[in-house]
Amino acid sequence: MDYKELGLTREDLVEMYRMMRLIRVFEENAVAYFKQGIVIGNMHMYVGEEAVATGFCKLLNKEDYIASTHRCDGHLIAKGADINAMMAELMGKQNGNCAGRAGKMHQTAPEVGLLSANGIVGASETLGTGHALYCSMFAPERVSVAFFGDGGGNQGAFHESMNLAALWKLPVIFVCENNHYAISTAVETSTAMGTFYQRAAGYGIPGVRVNGNDVLEVYAAAKEAIDRARRGEGPTFIECDTYRLRGHHEGDEQTYRTKEEVAEVKKNNDCIGRMQKLLMSELNWTEADDEALIKSVDDQVAAAVEFGIKGEPMRVEDMMDNLYAE
Amino acid sequence: MSTIMYREAIAAALAEEMRRDEKVFVMGEDVAITGGVFKATKGLLAEFGPQRVRNTPLSECAIAGVATGAAMCGARPVAEIMHVDFIGCCFDIVLNQMSKMCYKTNGQVTVPMVLRTQGGRGRSNGCTQSQSLESLFTHIPGLKVVMPSTPYDAKGLLKTAIRDNNPVIFIEHKGLYQTKGEVPEEEYLIPLGKADVKRQGKDVTIISYSKSVLMALDAAKELEAKGIDAEVLDLRSLVPLDFEAITESVRKTGRVIITHEACERTGFGAEVAAQIADRLFDELDAPILRVCGANIPVPNATLPEVESAPTVERLVNAAVCICQGGKRNG
């Protein structure tokens, strides 16, 4: 995929590279503090899948909506959510993005169009379609992107959402992040066709499958789909073939796959490694540039950790608040 | 005042709110051309067009989920689930999405929507289209639950529900759509959480909601002939619950019967009884009684369908028992 043909500049590529690194370092830190008991909850990491969120969100405006899953950190960060408030939320702190009451799987950043991530697999499909209905009726300049995994692709909500969105020509892009495993169940043993993208034909909408670890491939498919949605031509279904480099959750023994399988992806098809290689081989990206970028990302995440640690835990006295809106 | 049917009151409330606020729209199965199988959305398509009166496929999960997703952005959808029994097809949206959004986001994301549905028996629709499932909803923090018994209440409560910034489960009764009642010409709203004394009395309080209120009123008439003056308290909304009105009535009568069509076991009557026992024990002159649905699926054949729900006869018997003494039947 030629970045120039996509209208991207060196600056754009560096920005996406930095974004993928930021997501990864944020999560690596979250895991490290989880192991110390400072971050709490059920940790589903996005490590390995960063190119998907990065490729899509690069094309979205702040006002566009995204609907996310239990594996939501990457979506939030790529959409521009405040990582300080994210880290604090992971620690159950009052300065978290939901004041500590949402936690890892339910983070929220309404100021950038992420109205709430979700612990229910498949919920992002219907909710994301609902955001698109809002766009089509009341905010036609906006679009909605619904992220879900290969697990979510096998929920009934998938069919109902795709059919309704296609029927009503809603500005929604359905993004299946096929990371090959629904917890321990390999996609070959959960999905009759093995892949998802061809289901789009049944709804009369475009469906494509791209290498989800190549941010440029993701970007290219996302651009076409988002442009189509903005033109009012309806939904697109994009299957991003990606890979979860960590367990389903932290503590997952991963008895369902070999270490070699994971190592192979890490070595040859990691989204960050791919972009680093491209930058170095074609865009005069030096070791020094790389070190400087890594340092700036590390510093940014360290500040988020500090922000979280300094925060006060959510108080029992506040737990009855905001059950209802006024 | 004009006399209109319950279903017309629903349609009128929807039309008035749709005229008032462009963010209000209706979606559901068969809501457009036919005006719904119960005709409660009749006339809306002609006035507001297909953009705001959205006929959907038979996809309850999408109806509830898409409405919730739109409401999260600031729309005010009124989504219709044709039979409350179909809630099983979209229960995740009710249980985990619309109800939890405001709380989990610490008030940043709200879900200002109404989920209109209907339940109850009386048309020999059998066990999957006759249920009274309100307790499923009252058990979930974050929802409001409204169950009107008259056209006047239905209209005023639905208008308020649409303006409420929270998800409201609005449960109509299939046996009420054709009932008539007086409704003012001018606009009015009824707050949620305000019970209504449908009949004043001093001997026993019959607490109810939805169609069972009409049965309670019939029973009160019969009780009058037996020298028992029954008060009929219509809760109108279960969440929020007007415990003040319950307190006022129980203080006056000292005797309570709770009646509803839903199965007795862990039905809403159990909650009301428990709260009265906890907070008003000293006001009571007799045990709290429940006259509720049998703990079985709703049978289809006419007589068992009727007899598995509360009847006037059983309600009268229960009132006589606690007011005058005697043996309780059933």
Image (cartoon, rainbow, N blue to C red):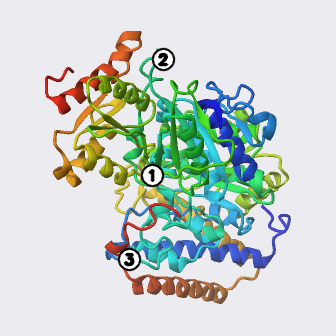
Quarter of the image for the N terminus of chain A: give it.
bottom right
Compared with A248, B58 (above or below) is above
Q: Position of residue B77 (x, y in %)?
A: 64, 47
In this rendering, the label closer to the viewer, 2 or 3: 2
How many other residues sit within 10 Å of disc 1, few (<14), some (14-19) or many (≥20)? many
Q: How many marks?
A: 3
At label 1, the amino acid type is Gly
**Badge 1: chain ID:** B
Q: Nearer the viewer, residue A20 or B86?
A: B86
Residue for badge 2: B125
At label 3, the amino acid type is Tyr
Q: Is residue A109 left or right of residue A313?
A: right
Q: Secondary structure at mark 2?
A: loop
The reply to the same-chain question for discs 1 and 2 is: yes
Q: Position of residue B327 (x, y in %)?
A: 14, 22
Residue for badge 3: A33
CA gap, disc 3 and disc 1 = 46 Å
Q: Nearer the viewer, residue B208 or A208?
A: B208
Q: Nearer the viewer, residue B289 or A24?
A: B289
At label 2, the amino acid type is Asn
Q: Which residue is painted at 21% across and 52% down in the image?
A: B278
Residue for badge 1: B193
CA gap, disc 1 and disc 2 = 31 Å
How many other residues sit within 10 Å of disc 2, few (<14), some (14-19) or many (≥20)? some
Q: Are marks 3 and 1 in contact (CB under 8 Å)?
A: no
